[in-house]
């Protein structure tokens, strides 16, 4: 059982799950912990599904966020992931050019990644915590 990052050959594939408002950030099977931690720090929530074989890991934008905030979170992550050397694919329906511009500006002005302000200010859930577009 693969995922979109495995299928696309990317380090991270960000997309909206079909017929839902869930925004996923898939990483390849066996992704390094550094990448998973970076997605955590950028505001995505880590999900896991243990199986008799591998443990499947993916990230989602927090469910309590508005649709616009989920798009901002997804797009905001792209320059930070690029800076860390990862290949990212993000679908057009979760792309927000203003969020990308803001994140790129913030990245130049600080050394540690953080979620966008609208996401960071939102209440947290009970859970622990080259871009190509299609």
Image (tube, rainbow, N blue to C red):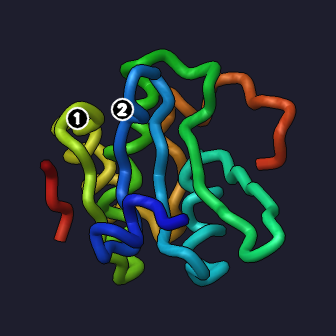
- In the picture, the disc for residue 14 is none
Number of residues whose C-alpha sits closer than 10 Å to that of mark 1, classed few (under 14), some (14–19) or many (20 or more): some
Q: Residue at x 36, y 32 (%)?
A: 71
- The residue indicated by pointer 1 is 96
Q: Mark 2 and mark 1 in contact (Cβ < 8 Å)?
A: yes
Q: Residue at x 20, y 46 (%)?
A: 101
Residue 8 vs residue 13, the one in the foreground: 8
Quadrant containing the N terminus is: bottom right
Q: Residue at x 86, y 32 (%)?
A: 126
Measured from the top left, where is residue 100 in percent x and y? 24, 46
Left or right? Give the position of 133 relative to 2: left
* Number of marks present in the image shown: 2
Residue 133 vs residue 102, the one in the foreground: 133
Q: CA distance from mark 1 to mark 2?
A: 6 Å
SS of the residue at dot 2? helix
- The residue indicated by pointer 2 is 71
Number of residues whose C-alpha sits closer than 10 Å to that of mark 2, classed few (under 14), some (14–19) or many (20 or more): many
Residue 15 vs residue 42, the one in the foreground: 15
Q: Is residue 50 above or below residue 62?
A: below
Residue 49 vs residue 101, the one in the foreground: 49
Measured from the top left, where is residue 31 in percent x and y? 56, 79
Measured from the top left, where is residue 44 in percent x and y? 59, 47
Q: Name the residue at the top extreme.
A: 66
Measured from the top left, where is residue 41 in percent x and y? 62, 57
SS of the residue at dot 1? loop
Q: Is residue 85 above or below residue 88?
A: below
Of pointers 1 and 2, the one earlier in the residue sequence: 2
Q: Can you see residue 83?
A: no
Q: Quadrant of residue 7?
A: bottom left
């Amino acid at each position: 059982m693969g995922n979109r990052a495995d299928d696309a050959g990317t380090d991270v594939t960000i997309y909206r799950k079909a017929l839902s408002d869930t925004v996923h950030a898939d990483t390849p099977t066996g992704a390094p912990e550094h990448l998973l931690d970076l997605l955590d720090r950028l505001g995505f929530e880590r999900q896991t599904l243990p199986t008799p074989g591998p443990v499947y890991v993916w990230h989602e934008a927090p469910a309590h966020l508005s649709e616009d905030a989920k798009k901002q979170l997804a797009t905001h992550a792209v320059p930070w992931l690029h800076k860390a050397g990862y290949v990212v694919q993000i679908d057009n329906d979760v792309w927000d050019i203003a969020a990308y511009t803001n994140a790129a500006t913030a990245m130049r002005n600080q050394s540690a990644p953080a979620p966008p302000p609208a996401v960071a200010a939102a209440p947290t859930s009970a859970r622990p915590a080259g871009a190509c577009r299609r």
